[in-house]
Image (cartoon, grey):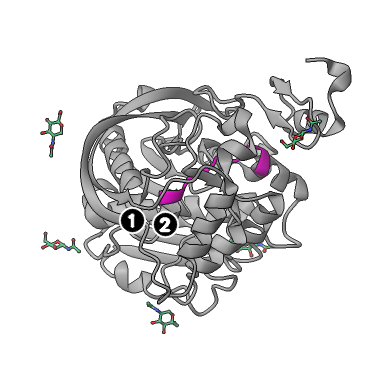
């Protein structure tokens, strides 16, 4: 790298993160950080935490819906596919997902377990966190202004342990075709990880947890909700962030249109070229802002961090977002759902009056249920100014429920 050729935008990335990373930026319109969010080892660990990274082989056994449309070669084909998918009913376009196939295999999942150095008796409560569509593991462990945006750091400071991982296809985890990876895949991986963590296999020196809380963000919340619906006994508590199940607030066609997806490997070959064309991403940072952020309650620098650390998502995940099992009425643990009041993705921009149902009915047998609309935030509650306000709701909820 000729340092005299490094444009100012690339230097900005470096100083923003405050970290020494390998950068290659010989083209100002296409800056990228090489391998920054692709390695098992993280670039930041909370100072009060003892953390260990693991590559976890997870056995999965699930039914996979088959992608039946023609895989695309470029953004012209992808755009036409998405236009057909969102065309009004009656036009005669076939569903892109067909019959299912049984999958019984092992996936390699990159994970990190952090526990407080200074243990105060809560460290055997483990929060197992599943990120959503867009970020990777660092959704929970932001290297960018961690005192404001890092959930793991917050939870560690309250005495809890956190196990968080890159979902299949993201970060340092195994990459499977984006035409195949879907909500059923994500649910099977989470069920497998929950069993392993419960057994104390990837929890360093704390061994078997006393309590396990599953936490999700967005697609990770739908995944967690699906896993809880299928196997309610896998967790003592469930925390769903950026979740909504009221159909008035869910607007899948609108979402496809506001994401304006592009083939990820073509948008940034250096970062995403290791994934097939079934992996897509929003068009630019304003696509991100439109769906995830609300003015005036965010710092544009936080948006830049989220954009620079983004992970592509599998098109089959997008198509099956709401396709997982929904009936969680057999869950008898404690439940918290917390969503930004103006969440654009799950409430079509306004959660007031449409949040409580059907969540209250689905979780009617939970030993406690707390529904929170977090003020002043859209989808990315972890990256608006008041992120720690949301983090406090989460750890207070655990405390109130004796964990
Ligand atoms: C810079 O990158 C963009 C996007 O990848 C590309 O279209 C353009 O041709 C590149 N410019 C130069 C000078 O390499
Ligand atoms: C899945 O594979 C494992 C190991 O190969 C095997 O023991 C198990 O019976 C299989 N399960 C199903 C449902 O096929
Ligand atoms: C709830 O548990 C009962 C008893 O095991 C079972 O019959 C029922 O199918 C379960 N409901 C759901 C939605 O899984
Ligand atoms: C959505 O919310 C409205 C308003 O509370 C409610 O009447 C409706 O039943 C909810 N929809 C579902 C599917 O629960
Ligand atoms: C910050 O978030 C908490 C939890 O949702 C909320 O109670 C509080 O009012 C928020 N503060 C501001 C200034 O919006």
Q: Which residue is mark 1?
A: 97
In the displayed structure image, the side of residue 386 where residue 201 appears, left or right: left
Mark 1 vs mark 2: in front: 1
Q: How many marks?
A: 2
Is residue 403 something that shows in the picture? no
The reply to whether callout 1 and callout 2 are in contact (CB within 8 Å) is yes
Position of 307 relative to 86 (above/below): above
Query: On the rendered image, what quadrant is the N terminus found in?
Result: top right
**Callout 2: helix, strand or loop?**
helix
Which residue is rendered at x = 54% and y = 27% of the image? 38
Of pointers 1 and 2, the one earlier in the residue sequence:
1
Position of 259 relative to 7 (above/below): below
Percent coordinates x, y for residue 308 in the rendering:
67, 38
Which residue is rendered at x = 39% and y = 23% of the image? 55
Which residue is rendered at x = 72% and y = 55% of the image? 298
**Callout 1: helix, strand or loop?**
strand
Is residue 158 something that shows in the picture? yes
Residue range of the region highlighted in magenta in the rendering? 307-316
Q: Which residue is mark 2?
A: 319
Which residue is rendered at x = 49% and y = 46% of the image? 72
* Residue nearest the viewer, comparing 39 with 332: 39
């Amino acid at each position: 790298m000729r340092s005299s050729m490094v444009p100012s935008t690339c230097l900005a990335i470096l100083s923003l993160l405050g970290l020494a990373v390998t950068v290659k930026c010989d083209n100002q319109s296409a800056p990228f950080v090489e391998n920054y969010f692709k390695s098992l080892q993280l670039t930041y660990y909370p100072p009060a935490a003892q953390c260990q990274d693991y590559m976890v082989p997870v056995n999965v056994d699930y039914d996979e819906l088959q992608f039946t449309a023609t895989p695309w070669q470029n953004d012209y084909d992808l755009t036409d596919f998405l236009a057909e998918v969102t065309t009004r009913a009656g036009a005669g376009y076939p569903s892109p997902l067909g019959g299912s196939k049984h999958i019984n295999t092992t996936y390699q999942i990159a994970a990190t377990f952090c526990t407080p150095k200074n243990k105060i008796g809560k460290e055997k409560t483990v929060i197992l966190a599943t990120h959503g569509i867009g970020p990777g593991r660092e959704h929970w462990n932001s290297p960018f202004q961690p005192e404001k945006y890092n959930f793991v750091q917050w939870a560690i400071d309250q005495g809890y342990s956190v196990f968080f991982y890159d979902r299949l296809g993201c970060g340092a985890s195994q990459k499977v075709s984006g035409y195949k990876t879907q909500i059923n895949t994500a649910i099977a991986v989470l069920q497998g990880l929950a069993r392993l963590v419960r057994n104390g296999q990837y929890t360093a020196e704390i061994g078997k947890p006393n309590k396990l809380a599953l936490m999700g963000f967005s697609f990770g919340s739908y995944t967690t909700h699906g896993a809880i619906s299928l196997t309610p006994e896998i967790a003592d508590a469930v925390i769903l962030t950026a979740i909504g199940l009221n159909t008035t607030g869910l607007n899948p066609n609108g979402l496809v249109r506001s994401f304006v997806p592009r083939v990820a490997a073509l948008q940034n070959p250096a970062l995403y070229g290791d994934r097939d064309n079934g992996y897509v991403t929003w068009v630019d940072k304003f696509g991100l802002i439109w769906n995830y952020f609300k003015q005036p309650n965010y710092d544009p620098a936080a948006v830049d961090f989220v954009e620079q650390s983004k992970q592509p998502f599998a098109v089959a995940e997008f198509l099956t977002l709401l396709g997982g099992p929904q009936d969680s009425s057999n869950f008898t643990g404690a439940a918290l759902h917390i969503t930004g009041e103006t969440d654009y993705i799950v409430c079509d921009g306004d959660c007031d009056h449409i949040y409580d149902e059907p969540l209250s009915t689905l979780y009617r047998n939970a030993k406690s249920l707390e529904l929170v609309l977090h003020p002043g935030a859209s989808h990315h509650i972890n990256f608006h100014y008041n992120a720690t306000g949301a983090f406090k709701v989460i750890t207070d909820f655990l405390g109130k429920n004796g964990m």
